[in-house]
Amino acid sequence: MSVDLAAPPTPRRGGPASLQLVRRIVATPSGAFGFTVAVLLVVVAVFAPVLAPHDYTALDIEHRLEGPSSTYWLGTDNLGRDLLSRLMMGVRIALQIAVPAVVLGVLVGLLLGLAAGYLGGKVDTAIVVILDAIQSFPSVVLALAVLALLGSSSWAIVLVLAVAFVPSFGRVTRTSVQAVQALPYVDAERNLGAGTLRIIGRHVLPNVVPPLIVLMAMNLPSAIGIESGLAFLGLGVQPPTPDWGVILSEGFARIRESPWPVLWTCGVLAVSTLGFTFLGERLRDVLDVRTTEVRS
Amino acid sequence: MTDVLEIAGLSVSYRVRGRRRTALHDISLTVAAGEILGLVGESGCGKSTLANAVLRLLPAGGEVTGGAITVAGAAVLSLDDTALRGYRGETAAMIFQDPFISLNPSFPIGTQLSLVQRAHGKRGARRTDQLAALAEVGLPDPESVMRAYPHHLSGGQRQRVMIAMALLLRPTLLVADEPTSALDVTTQAQILELLRALRDTHGTTILFVSHDLGSVAQLCDRVAVMYAGRIVETGQVDALFAAPRHPYSRALLTAIPSWRNTAELVTIPGQPPNLAEPAQGCAFAPRCAHSVDVCIAAPPPLLPLEGGQVACVLPELAGPVEGRGR
Amino acid sequence: MLIYLARRVGMAVLVLLIVLVFLASLVHILPGDPVSLMLGPRADPELIALARQEMDLDSSVPAQVWHFLANAVGGDLGQDFLTKRPVSELIGAALPNTLVLALTSLLLAVVAAIPLAVVSAARQGSWLDRILGTLSVGIVSIPSYVIGMVLLLLATVWLGWLPAIGTGSFADPLDYLAHLVLPALSLALVWAGYLARLLRSALLEVLGQDYIRAARAYGIAEWRIYYQLAMRNAIPSVVALIGVALGDLMGSAIFIEVIFTRNGLGTLLYNAATQRDHPTMRGGVVVIAVLFVLANLLADLVNRAINPRLREVSSR
């Protein structure tokens, strides 16, 4: 993986620069799609209770497992609850778990990467080996094991997901640190007495932030996918909370009576994961980052 | 004697990032059956482009913008896909410069040879022919060479393998694009000997492209000198090397360092021309010591002169020059 | 060669140890007691103590790991807490199905990826190439269970072609295959796109090489150039990924097995997890870890075998 370190980092400004960035992101069809999806999801997550047409907990047994109608735009689930409203609440729940997981992963990964890059030697080797071990192991299996042992509280899920993402963030940081340390002008600064913190702040961080942002966008779909998957298996968020995985599992149980819950849930899952992935890809091009492909 | 290779008015250009560069201007050339013609010039003069064009192997972006190529009576530029595949290897075959990167690293030699034969519908006795070809090019243990991978062989061996591959289908014309440039001097001499032997035994016509005047002097019957995408002079090797007529040929030959001449190293002043902006007149004029006004007005045509051809308006100026001889 | 092998095996063992230690330490470090989770909050304390002893949860972490390993070498992976059957027996019954699923999916993915990559490379830059590119990136990010679910809907609920539930038995190969199609397809779809993309890049690089030009110069047919001469040189870059693919497939297989009600390691693990059956889970996770490490090792060895130059460079 290589980051263009030849140019000194550009100072960051708010306002016009961000707008320019957005414009570049939406310049391609996939970028536009990704950006729209991301914005839409965030808006729905924040304003779900207001935007939802019905109360997501309201039962209507008479109209259970119906298809789309004028009252219930997407149909109803096995207890007659409005699918659209439940799915909208689901956005909030998905992001409530996925975002902290990714953020936590970044923070821990950043720390470990910095430690590995700066301290070098045995610490570096140890960290690399551990990161390798975690990364190579299928995260779902790990999550299953941990949740079975600890029970399915929200923070346990966030924790498990974060652990799965730490290796990718850690490696990217470590590579960045190593690259920066090798630069002659950084060496010069160090000789002039600049402390490690200052070097980190002025050189490492600006160079490591773009790839980390891209990686965050790419890992978010994984987080959502695994989180929903765990809920589907009954090990994540529990019913009646309208997590997408829960809706999926309830719909799956009644799939022959009505395909709609499964269909719509698969739809939102697909659109969300696609959206964030395309956004991440476009960000990678726009920010001119050349990370190696990551799959967690 | 019929001509095996006839090039008439060939022009080739490349389109790179929207800009068009003319690599060959109106090239006309003939090679008689059983003749070895050397094609010399500095890097970028278009000799490789010419060699590639004969096999229609121009890289992406390259296109023929005019002229015709005839090999053993076949109109090369108008061959359809099937005929083209038959032509390549059977009528005309190419020997590449760097045998290491021209041989597929993942297949043993025998398999690569078989693939060539199979592509031309050769059924029985494939192995026999392969062994014969490998023996003919001077490889002492053909059996083990057949089983070997390219990285097992030395540079000279690989080049011999390439020549064997070229011979498998007994082509009429062999186009050798700098076949000895990647080899050491001793091996170079051996390969040149091999090529001559092939011509003597099978009557194969050879187009020998090289920037090494020494090799050309050793091997070729006739030579054509190229500059900036045009042929500036042709002639019998002995005559041309002894008394080059075109100012560029003269400069080229004078520039060869020699143990005889211990004076300062002679170079040709100026820079090679920019192909993207072709000159109006003679491409060599800016660097020529003898250029006059008419040289810049229009490119001089290639006209016959004393057993060869020259593209210059001032051939009298050549005169007897201390050339290289053999 | 031997040194290399030893080093890889060493790394593999290390990974396994880390997994074991991790599992054992989790129980000690973090709140939440697996036994009470399993038996319920109002279980008899004596029962809890007995269970803890049975599952060796009272020993220290190193002791737990040591006991487990010592027994595992002899083939004893513990006892399923609820059914009392040996874990090794349960795994032995379930494993073949999962292996068949994983390998079939991988095979399907590779078989699909090859022509996709060739078409994309041959028509580089065309609309087809770009659409395939976008699709591959897209499909890879969609969770596999979503694809499995959709396929399930399409093929069984709406069209009624293929069976939705169960594994079928080896005794009836055709029936087994019929049950295998949809699950394998769900898993394969994701990887087919991704592999195709990687293969395309490798192909493009190979196609720029001189030996491909030379092949054309001898009149060798285009299809042979792509599928034999170029592909042979491009495949190694993809083989390295097979280990990663298998690992990912193991994870996704859990969902797919549950969705299609297949009797495999995934469902075993899933049931053990929902019932908090510690011994079975531990056994299952360890077996998956071993398989995973073996798969990576195999992929690595295959890679060196098919790349003749690599073979010789390191044996010196």
Image (cartoon, helix red, strand yellow):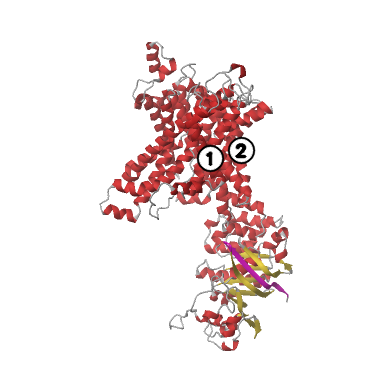
| 1 and 2 marks in contact (CB < 8 Å) | no
Chain letter of the residue beneath label 2 in the structure image: C
Report if residue C206 is visible in the image: yes
Nearer to the camera, C167 or A177? A177
Is residue B6 highlighted in magenta?
A: yes
Q: Which mark is residue C305?
A: none
**In terms of secondary structure, where does tag 2 sit?**
helix
Tell me the crowding category of disc 2: few under 14, some 14 to 19, or many 20 or more residues within 10 angstroms, Cα based.
some
Amino acid at circle 1: Thr
- Quarter residue C213 falls in: bottom right
Q: What residue is disc 1 on?
A: A36
Q: What residue is disc 2 on?
A: C108
Chain letter of the residue beneath label 1 in the structure image: A
C20 sits left or right of A90 in the view: left
Q: Position of residue B303 (x, y in %)?
A: 65, 82
Residue visible at 42% across and 52% down in the picture = A4
Which residue ends up furthest to the left in the rendered image?
Answer: A193
Cα distance in 3D space between marks 1 and 2: 34 Å
- Quarter residue A168 falls in: top left
Nearer to the camera, C120 or A286? A286
Amino acid at circle 2: Leu
Tell me the crowding category of disc 1: few under 14, some 14 to 19, or many 20 or more residues within 10 angstroms, Cα based.
some
Nearer to the camera, B72 or A50? A50
Q: Position of residue C267 (x, y in %)?
A: 53, 25
Magenta highlight: main SS: strand
Nearer to the camera, B155 or A121? A121
Q: Position of residue C55 (x, y in %)?
A: 40, 19
Report if residue C6 is visible in the image: no
Magenta region: which residues? Answer: B2-18
